[in-house]
Each structure stands twice: as structure tokens, then as C-alpha cells.
Image (spheres, rainbow, N blue to C red):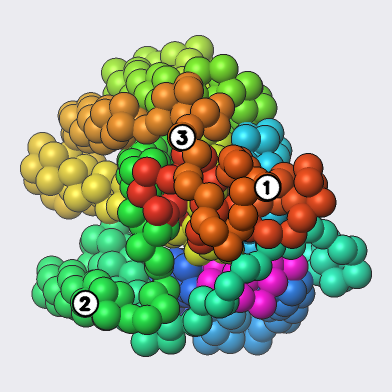
Amino acid sequence: MIVALDGTVLTVVQPALQRDLDASFAQAQWTSTGYLIAVASLLVFAGRLGDRYGHRRVFAVGTLGFALASAGVGLASGIGWVIALRVAQGVFGALLQPATLGMLRAAYPADRLGMPIAVRTSAIGLAAAAGPVVGGALATELGWRSVFFLSVVPALLIGVLALVVRVPSATRGGTVAGLDLPGAALFAVSLACLVHTLVGVAEGGRPAATVFGACAAALAAAAFLRHERRAASPLIPPRLIGSAAVGPALGVLVAASAAMFGTLFVATYFLQDVRGLDPLHSAVRALPLAVMMIVSAPYAAVLLRRYGPRGTITAAMAVLALGVLALSRLDQAAGPVAVGGGFVLVGAGFGTVMVAATAVVVRHAPVTDAGVAGGLQQTAMNVGPTLGIAMATTLMTALAGRAHGTGPHWTDSAFLRGMGPTLTALATVAALGAVAGTRLPGRAANTGAAPKPPVSLQQGARRPEAAADPASAARRDGSHHAAGPGGEHPGSHQSPGAAAGARGA
């Protein structure tokens, strides 16, 4: 919640920060871009650090470091310091975010992860709702620096609690996976180039730089895949990425976050430029989206248990697509009911998908790979929004720019001419996510009903069936062994692995 709040309040205070520090627009944008590149490129490696050294320790380091970096931004004397400290915030944010999912995976049985993840998602939604209002009020009364001090005391308190309070940890069996530093470096470079390229597209960057960034990302990704096939201890284990459930769940998260954030980007311009609302009133019009994220999260956990991942996620993605289509029909006469109705559908669909798809990713990961799973989930939630905003920017520039012919300052009619097709394209992305959702496990797989793996001679015949989760097995029979080779639980036995994805939310 602290990380999400920090991101939302920055958007509100960026103009004031730019004026006060006499910075250029590009420099002000790098306060966001630098953070995004740092966090997206390090999430998976940070998750592996947690798997190896303990999620509680990594979480504490990340939270305390985030607090100190936030205080540093509030005291910074120039824009260079702000950018550098925002990059540091990204590094520490990457450490703490996968660790939250890793700790949940170790603390709860696999079939009871839905509600804890729902609480986590509701907190993110609450931060999204409160951020613009709190940030605007603080910036107006106390200046832009005050918003960065907002998270310092809570983060310090949480970091200290993480050090002193004992929480369940993963049962470790066999050899602990290595860190795979070359693989981590290649993966970080590929993601950094990809994110930088997408951000450049969204900001109207130079075509040559965009092409170069895309080529660099592709080459680094190819080198990473080649390295992973040969590595003795790969950063992303085959047993994780080979899961039949995790790949579609990650695709759903990318599609959902791309559709939602791309839509929110376009809708914000619609409310402020076409409808003429100020930032506060436009935030109030969009408030139903955040409220529905908070409300839908606990219901998503119930739906997940009743209907399974396939039914829940496919239906939620359809609701998200309908919400985006509803917003694509808005015009200059659109009132609060029409705008709010579209945002209600988008928020309900996205909040449900966030909980259900994240639960699939984390549940199908062995406990010993929970950090990498959380890192992959968070990576998806960082790449998706960047992709959605880049797509929205490209389409709006092509459609509205051609309609008006004079560049970024469009007439209302030109903007509306571009907005409809752009949001329709984003609704199509959500629909493709619904198609990916049909490949997820059904209700029977979600309940843990699965064939039992064979019992090895080393395990002996006293345990004739595998536990659904290593932690729950230990609680039932008093043992501390991981269930099955590699710690897999029912649902991940078909492909010996489970994977994960990366925001937010």
C-alpha cells in the first residue's frame, strides 16, 4: 500500500516539483521513468534473493531502504538527486514487493491463498483511491516535499516489525538454488530496455531510439533464454515456467493491466480536456474504479473457491472488456452516471482478475520458488500498464492527430474520434485476456483434486499421498519435509513447475 500510494501522489505533485527545482519536462518525467525501470528490471532477482536468504529479511531491507530513500527525496536539493533517489526507491521497492507474496505463500496453505491476496489487493485499491486526494491536499497546504515524508514513519515501523516478528518460512529441502547472476543481469537488461522503449513511445520519443531500444531488448532476451537453457541453477526454473496454469495467468495479468491503465490514461485526458474538469474533480469521477477494486477483491476470493480460476477469470476479463467498451461510447454530454458506470465495470473486472490470477501464479509455485513467482507476477503488473499506455498513446496520436492535423493539441471532436477506436482496441486486449483465461484450471483443479505423485523409496511407504502444500503437510503430521520432488503440490504436478508474474498491483 505504501509503494502504491507513493506512485499515485507523485503524479499529482510532479508539476510543482518541476517548477520548484527548475527542471525540464524530460527531467521531471525521469522521476517516474527511473523508478519504473529500476523496479521492473530487478523484481525477479529480488524474489530469488528472498527464496535463498529469507523473504522476511529481504522485505525488511526493502522497506527500511524505501523509507530512507523517500526521506531523501523530500530533502533533495536538485532534480538530479531526486532522480537518483527515485531509482534507489525502485531498487528497494523491487526487494519488498515479491517478498510480500513469498511470505503469504509460506504462511498459508495453497488452497487458502485467495483471501490473503484479496486483502493485499484491497490495500492497493485503497491507496489508488486515497493517493490523489491525500497528495493534492498535502501538496496544496505543505508543498510537494511533504508527500514523500508521508510514507517514512509507516515504512520504518513496518520494517522494524518485519525484523522482530517471527513469521512462517518456507520448508527447504535439498540444494538451495543459486543466484544465477549472469541470468539476472541479462533479464534486467532486457526488461530495462523494454520498459524504456515503451515509456519512450508513450512520451512521444524519437523513432530511432525506439527501434534501437526494441532491438536491444530482443537481443538481451534471446541471450537470456540461451543462458537459462544451459545454466545449472537458472534464475527462472523450468519447473516454474513450465506450469500449464502459470503462463496463461501471467498473460491475463499483462492483458488486464494493459487494458485498465491504458483506458485510465485516455479517460483522464477525456475528463480534463474534453469535459473541462480539474484534476480533483476528474479523480472523483474515476473514484468508482478504485472503490470497486476494494470491494471486489474479497468477493473474488469467494468466487475463486466456488467456480475455480477458469470461470472466475474469464468472466472478470469479460466484465473488464465491457467496461472499457462502455467508456469508449462517451461523448461531450456524458454525465457522472455514464462515466461512473463504465469505471464500476472496469474496477470490478480488474480487481477480481488481480486476486484470482495472482492466486493462481503463487499457488502453483513450489514454496521454495515463491519469491521468483512473486517477482514474475509483479513484473507482469509493471510491464502491462507501460504497454497499455504506449498502445493508447500511439493510437491516439495516429487517429486524433490525423483527424486534426496539428499535433498534440486536439479539438474535442478530434479527441473523441480517436478515443472510440483506441478504447475499442484496449477492450480487444481484455477480450484476448479472457481467451487466455479459458486455458486456466477449472474448479476441480482449484480444489486440489489431483492424482498423487508416486512415493519414492527414500520417502518410504508411511506417506501414501502427497500433501497439497508443504507447510500444511508439516502442520498435519508434524514432519518438516517438502511434499513431492521439488515441493510441488497438486495442481502443479502435470508440468513440474509453476511460475509467477509481477505492479500491483
Q: Is residue 147 above or below residue 365?
A: below
Image quadrant where residue 223 sits: bottom left
Tell me where residue 127 appears, x and y as whole percent. Answer: 67, 45
Q: Residue at x 61, y 57 (%)?
A: 459
The residue where tag 3 is placed is 451
Q: Residue at x 8, y 43 (%)?
A: 402
Q: Which-is-in-front pick, marks 1 and 3? A: 1
Q: Is residue 134 above or below residue 215?
A: above
Tell me where residue 277 appears, x and y as whole percent. Answer: 50, 33
Is any atom of residue 51 visible in this view?
Answer: yes
Query: What amino acid type is highlighted by mark number 2?
Result: Arg
Between discs 1 and 3, the one toward the N terminus: 3
Secondary structure mostly seen in the magenta stretch: helix
Tell me where residue 70 appears, x and y as whole percent. Answer: 70, 73
Q: Residue furthest right?
A: 164
Q: Is residue 366 above or below residue 71?
A: above
Q: How far apart in space, not on screen, are marks 1 and 2 (Cα)?
A: 42 Å
The residue where tag 1 is placed is 462
CA neighbours of label 1 inside 10 A, class few (<14), some (14 to 19), many (20+)? few
- Magenta span includes 48: yes
Q: Which-is-in-front pick, marks 1 and 2? A: 1
Image quadrant where residue 37 sits: bottom left
